[in-house]
Image (cartoon, coloured by chain):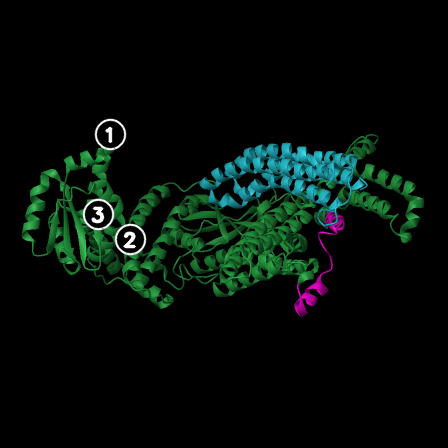
Chain colours: A green, B cyan
């Protein structure tokens, strides 16, 4: 539960290791490269040429991957280390195969080769554009421009006829209609090519049942109505010829990741700087350096890298004492980690700040549960989340977000149960053991105890405010400024607690003694407050005046605390909307007939799902707001800068964490470096 | 039903109506500019959502005041109290601070958020700064709510 300040390191290594080193760094998500002081000259030109070549290669591979994904049966197996190594060993052959196959795909994808259907739609589209441009009745124009024939063909003979049609480029075809036995094909060509259409029909009269002039069919109508059908038939009859290749999808996926990694490495060459250490004259010709922010894992990556490459490479820690951009990272256990999402809304903590995540966790969960406050909804959300968590096994931020919502849904169940919120149903009318159980759990009736709950909401808000000031005090102590902490936030805590004590003294006989001493008590506290707050003022006589002036800040405590009244409002809203949905369902549906029951069930399902979606979102945003606006400003400025690794996360190859090798899994550098040898 | 009850119900209706309108108009301008930023920077969605939701507070305050009025006259519990005209008027005036301040601050907050989305556009991580600036406008609505609650609560029914 802390904020980790990252370190900045200088890595010095030989020039020939630039790409291997950058590849290894690219695989790490814990290293942020920094612009060098003096850029290594000439490297960017080489990199740009290399990057453009690699990108061309990747584009071809991507194209083939997409083709194979469409045409190959999905038979996804995990890619083993051995497979990766073998694939890369065979890179030269694979590369040739990729070039050839990509060329074949390009040829097949050309419009004329693909079949007339595609060009048909294009031509019809062109004619439509012409018609619109001339602003004349489209039917008149199309009949002037277009020659059409509507053929009725038996379904079995359609594909043969379409194959024949493929050979005659000026004729375009669309399926006008289709029934069990016959298909109506609309042949379209420009009027100059009418003879092609007629001669085609003569030659293939054996396939054709009947012929119509087709003039009754406006081209625009044919186009609009049959666009979808054309594509269907196109898939049936004009499928791309199935191209065969020795290339396997998994091989291409390996190549894709490896080349993308290589591209990233070349892109990162801009971070390579000239050597700036001792013995500059001799070493600068052989050595280069890079600067990088690293956390603990990132440091491990760099130090193992140094061990691996050896050859005089070394790592040197640079001072961060006077830097304002020190990279930081939150480090919390798995229980608290989900709350980092809330903190990140404001920004990550600086090295001298506290990480608010553990401190907001309790408040966030309690406030959320109270504000949503329906146990039935809580159960539904929890079930959905648990299913998603175990069935889909999400990772990263989504996983943490789901965990956060699981905490919140458990809290919602708790608060829903004690306030009697069960899908907006009045627990007093529920019969049997269930009703008794629900009633026994209900401790507060929201609607009849509005003022009480309002007061509770405000008290909860005040406690969080006070806790925020206490955390500010802790921050002062953490940074070694104990006097500053006691005189600043310390005097605020003293003043606020005294005011509370005086305010509640009349409510309890045990606190009656406070009334007798409240005047001197308040005077003492105010004097302390005045001197404490004005401590930074150099003129000793002005200190109390300046200090007492800060008492006006009390309005911010007041307004912030009042803002917590939204907890009550949100809690009421969920319950009221839920009961209204139940009311609508009972009025519109009922249980007298099957139809009534169906309507009731539908209204209940849709209505409550809508209410859940609406209120979960509303509650979530409002509770985050309470943390960001009311709680955080007391002690948190989010001065941290997050590490931004400029790496590549492989899409297909699984890279073990903290891999000490020069590339994905156990690939030899010579393999990874393959493209530069090509 | 007495004129007093009608006035009390009017107090509830006016508070949610005006404060809610402020929220709607504020959220409208905030969400419009937020959507613009998100279209360019999808990563800014979280921040845009949060800032767009800020002007919804005024509606919540209006709703809260309305519920307190309705609870005061016994409409929620189903035991409607006898309210004379003076009390009804007092409740109506009591609801005015939250209603009007909610309306005006909702609209104004929307404008501040609209300007604040530039912060989001430059750096989505700086959402906190945009939020804090926008919340300054809301203070008056909070004080309006406070005054309304104090007035409504002190009226003897």
Query: Residue A135's spot in the image, x, y percent?
Result: 24, 29
Mark 1 highlights which residue?
Answer: A135
Determine the main secondary structure of the stretch shown in magenta: helix
* Secondary structure category for the residue under label 3: helix
Specify the quadrant of the image occupied by residue A403.
bottom right
Element assignment for label 2: helix
Callout 3 crowding tier (Cα within 10 Å): few <14, some 14–19, many ≥20: some
Kindly report which numbered mark, 3 or 1, lies closer to the viewer in this rendering.
Answer: 1
Whole-percent x, y for residue A552 in the image? 77, 34
Q: Secondary structure at mark 1?
A: loop
Q: Are marks 1 and 2 in contact (CB under 8 Å)?
A: no
Residue position marked by numbered label 2 in the rendering = A63
Query: Which chain contains the residue that carries disc 3?
Result: A
Choose the circle earlier in sequence order: 2 or 3: 2
Mark 2 burial class by Cα count in 10 Å: few <14, some 14-19, many 20+: some
The residue nearer to you, when weighing A496 against B58, is B58
Q: Is residue B58 visible?
A: yes
Please report whichever mark, 3 or 1, sits nearer to the chain's N-terminal start.
3
Labelled pair 2, 3 in contact (Cβ < 8 Å): no
Q: Which residue corresponds to the image point at 50% horizontal and 37% vertical from the top-left?
A: B32
In-front residue for pair A645/A164: A164
Question: Could you tell me if the residues under marks 3 and 1 are in contact, i.e. CB atoms within 8 Å?
Answer: no
Reading the chain from its start, which is encountered first: label 1 or label 2? 2
For the magenta stretch, what is the residue range? Answer: A430-459
Q: The numbered mark 2 sits on a residue in which chain?
A: A
The answer to whether A309 is drawn above or below residue A454 in the figure is below
């Amino acid at each position: 539960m802390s904020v980790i300040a990252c370190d900045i390191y200088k890595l010095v290594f030989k020039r020939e290791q630039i790409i291997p080193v950058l590849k290894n760094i690219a695989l790490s998500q814990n290293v942020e490269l920094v612009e060098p002081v003096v850029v290594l000259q000439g490297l960017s030109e080489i990199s740009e040429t290399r990057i453009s070549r690699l990108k061309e290669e990747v584009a071809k591979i991507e194209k083939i991957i997409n083709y194979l994904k469409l045409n190959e049966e999905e038979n996804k197996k995990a890619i083993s280390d051995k497979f990766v190594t073998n694939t890369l060993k065979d890179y030269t052959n694979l590369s040739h195969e990729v070039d050839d196959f990509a060329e074949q795909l390009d040829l097949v994808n050309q419009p004329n080769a693909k079949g007339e259907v595609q060009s048909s739609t294009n031509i019809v589209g062109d004619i439509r554009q012409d018609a619109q441009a001339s602003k004349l009745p489209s039917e008149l124009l199309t009949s002037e421009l277009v020659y059409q024939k509507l053929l009725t063909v038996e379904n079995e003979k359609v594909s043969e006829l379409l194959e024949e049609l493929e050979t005659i480029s000026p004729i375009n075809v669309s399926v006008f209609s289709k029934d069990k036995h016959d298909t109506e094909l609309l042949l379209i060509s420009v009027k100059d090519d009418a003879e092609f259409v007629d001669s085609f029909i003569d030659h293939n009269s054996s396939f054709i049942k009947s012929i119509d002039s087709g003039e009754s069919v406006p081209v625009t109508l044919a186009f609009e109505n049959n666009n979808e059908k054309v594509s269907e038939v196109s898939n049936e009859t004009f499928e791309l010829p199935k191209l065969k290749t020795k290339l396997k999808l998994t091989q291409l996926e390996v190549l894709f990741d490896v080349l993308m990694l290589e591209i990233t490495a070349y892109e990162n060459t801009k971070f390579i700087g000239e050597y700036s250490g001792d013995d500059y004259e001799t070493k600068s010709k052989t050595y280069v350096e890079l600067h990088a922010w690293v956390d603990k894992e990132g440091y491990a990556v760099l130090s193992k890298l140094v061990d691996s490459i050896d050859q005089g490479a070394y790592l040197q820690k640079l001072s961060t004492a006077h830097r304002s951009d020190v990279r930081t990272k939150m480090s919390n256990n798995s229980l608290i980690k989900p709350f980092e999402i809330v903190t990140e809304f404001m920004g990550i903590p600086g090295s001298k700040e506290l990480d608010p995540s553990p401190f907001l966790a309790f408040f966030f969960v309690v406030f959320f549960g109270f504000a949503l406050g329906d146990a039935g909804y809580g159960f539904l959300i929890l079930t959905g989340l648990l299913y998603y968590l175990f069935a889909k096994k999400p990772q990263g931020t989504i996983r943490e977000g789901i965990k956060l919502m699981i905490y919140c849904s458990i809290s919602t169940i708790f608060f829903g149960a004690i306030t009697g919120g069960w899908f907006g149903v009045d627990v007093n009318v529920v019969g049997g053991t269930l009703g008794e159980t629900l009633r026994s759990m209900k401790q507060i009736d929201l609607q009849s105890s509005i003022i009480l709950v309002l007061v509770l909401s405000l008290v909860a808000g005040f406690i969080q405010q006070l806790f925020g000031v206490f955390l500010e005090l802790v921050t002062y102590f953490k940074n070694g400024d104990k006097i500053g902490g006691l005189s600043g936030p310390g005097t605020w805590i003293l003043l606020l607690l005294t005011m509370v004590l005086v305010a509640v003294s009349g409510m309890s006989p045990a606190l009656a003694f406070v009334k007798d001493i409240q005047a001197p008590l308040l005077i003492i506290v105010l004097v302390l407050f005045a001197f404490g707050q004005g401590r930074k003022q150099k003129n000793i006589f002005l200190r109390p005046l300046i200090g007492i002036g800060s008492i006006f800040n009390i309005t911010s405590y007041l307004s912030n605390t009042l803002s917590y009244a939204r907890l009550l409002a949100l809690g009421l809203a969920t319950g009221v909307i839920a009961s209204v949905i139940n009311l609508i369902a009972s009025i519109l549906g009922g249980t007298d007939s099957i139809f009534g029951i169906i309507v009731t069930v539908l209204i209940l399902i849709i209505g409550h799902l809508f209410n859940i979606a609406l209120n979960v979102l509303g509650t979530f945003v409002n509770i985050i707001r309470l943390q960001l606006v009311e709680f955080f400003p007391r002690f948190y400025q989010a001065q941290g800068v997050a590490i931004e690794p400029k790496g590549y996360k492989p899409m297909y190859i699984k890279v073990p964490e903290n891999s000490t090798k020069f590339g994905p899994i156990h690939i030899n550098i010579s393999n990874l470096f393959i493209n530069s040898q090509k | 039903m007495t004129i007093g009850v009608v006035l009390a119900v009017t107090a509830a209706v006016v508070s949610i109506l005006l404060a809610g309108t402020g929220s709607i108009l504020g959220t409208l301008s905030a969400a419009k500019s937020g959507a613009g930023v998100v279209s360019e920077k999808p990563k800014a969605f979280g921040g845009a959502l949060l800032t767009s939701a800020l002007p919804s507070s005024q509606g919540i305050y209006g709703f809260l005041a309305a519920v307190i009025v309705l609870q005061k006259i016994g409409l929620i519990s189903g035991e409607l109290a006898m309210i004379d005209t003076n009390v009804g008027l007092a409740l109506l005036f009591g609801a005015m601070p939250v209603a009007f301040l909610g309306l005006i601050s909702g609209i104004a907050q929307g404008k501040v958020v609209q300007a604040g989305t530039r912060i989001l556009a430059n750096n989505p991580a700086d959402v906190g700064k945009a939020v804090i600036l926008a919340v300054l406008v809301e203070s008056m609505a909070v004080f309006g709510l406070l005054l309304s609650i104090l007035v409504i609560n002190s009226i003897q029914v």
